Image (cartoon, rainbow, N blue to C red):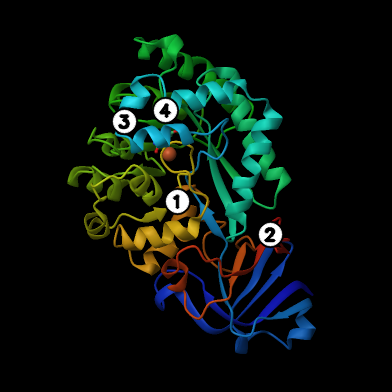
Amino acid sequence: MWDRLWTGARLATMEKGGAPYGMVEKGAVGVENGRIVYCGEEADLPGRPDGLAREIHCLDGRWITPGLIDCHTHLVYGGDRAGEFEMRLEGASYEELLKAGGGILSTVRATRDASLDSLVASALPRLDALLAEGVTTVEVKSGYGLNVATETKMLRAARRLGKLRPVSVVTTFLGAHALPPEFKDDADAYIDLMCDEALPAVAGEGLADAVDVFCEKIAFNLEQTERVFRAAQAAGLPVKLHAEQLSDMGGAALAARYGALSCDHLEFLSGEGAAAMAKAGTVAVMLPGAFYFLRDTNVPPIAMLREAGVAMAVSTDCNPGSSPATSLLLMLNMAATLFRMTPEEALAGVTREAARALGVKQDRGTLKQGKAADLAIWDIERPAELSYRIGFNPLYCAVKDGELVERSR
Ligand code: DI6
Ligand code: FE
């Protein structure tokens, strides 16, 4: 007997190659031991529902999608940056604030001062907001510690979040996010510290699933980025990159050479960068919240990425400075309205392609027999509603590893 069976469902399996959205009009999903054991036409079930599963839920035509995946967040941090937001509204730029010791560095001070417990406590409401919209997997980066002790504290906090809530947490070490004041004017020495001490410590304790760098004029250059990538490779960790967000540094092509899982932001991506990503199978992660909140005008080259055959994911980039966003559904709307992604591309971007960006596509991201039973069930008439509405949450319920998720708010 299966543990649970949902009938009367419309499925957006998000499997490629068939109908749009991988749609099944009269579908059923069965789960056992946290895995999908059946996903397809209800008529093709291998028996009567009550003979197949211990628990049966008829969904009256509601839609099931894969559980949503937020594949790029800075969810764990101390303090907030509402004051900086006011300064930006009065004309200060994001880059100027960082150069003057504010911006990311003000969050670094608050994060260093925060205890592990308080980092967890302040991240939980943000995580709960994501979960309330059907998120079942979330990536969390370090990068507001910029020393060994605080970077590891952040990653421990992230791991703990995954124990406190029904969500898979994938962690990323982003030690090379900004240059801390102790290393002012000596970025290379800071990169040495990250490569020789921080990264091996983090990898040794199993605290990181991947390694990221902020490659930008206000952060780290190509050569420094490559040094971090080599250290990641030596530690057996895959890489990803904050690339071409504020200028074209050529970071995407470099990341592609290292087989990066993803390049993220990409407002200033060049044709060569896109071609290199396509060749390497690197996912382009679109972050419309940061584009919107920084009032960017350079739209990432969606048509070029589409044409080059680069898979596109969509994420919140949840962070205190450039995207204080905890709604992945709002990002779907922004991906469509601001970036002109189709609603189907946007939904694939928070399911199938987000799983690929995290290196978990074998296990998650589509509804398929054998994959983890992570589902989002929606009170909607068609999948495009998920990117159509603004500020409305049609989640009926979420399922994590086959278990119904209780709403925590
Ligand atoms: N790009 C971003 O959008 C975030 N980090 C990065 O490298 C912003 C981080 C912050 O402003 O706190
Ligand atoms: Fe980011």
Q: CA distance from mark 3 to mark 1?
A: 26 Å
Residue visible at 34% across and 38% down? 89
Decide which of tag 2 and tag 1 comes sooner along the chain: 1
Mark 4: few/some/many CA within 10 Å (<14, 14-19, 20+)? many
**Label 4 CB-ligand 1 distance < 8 A:** yes
Q: Which residue is mark 2?
A: 401
Q: Which residue is mark 4?
A: 103
In this view, the mark in front (3 or 1): 3
Element class at badge 3: loop
Q: CA distance from mark 2 to mark 4?
A: 38 Å
Q: Where does ligand 2 appear, by image quarter?
A: top left
Decide which of tag 1 and tag 4 comes sooner along the chain: 4
Q: Which residue is mark 3?
A: 92
The amino acid type of the residue labelled 3 equals Ala
The amino acid type of the residue labelled 4 equals Gly
Decide which of tag 3 and tag 2 comes sooner along the chain: 3
In this view, the mark in front (2 or 4): 4
Q: Which residue is mark 1?
A: 315
- Is the C-beta separation of discs 3 and 2 under 8 Å? no
In this view, the mark in front (2 or 1): 1
109 shown above or below 293? above
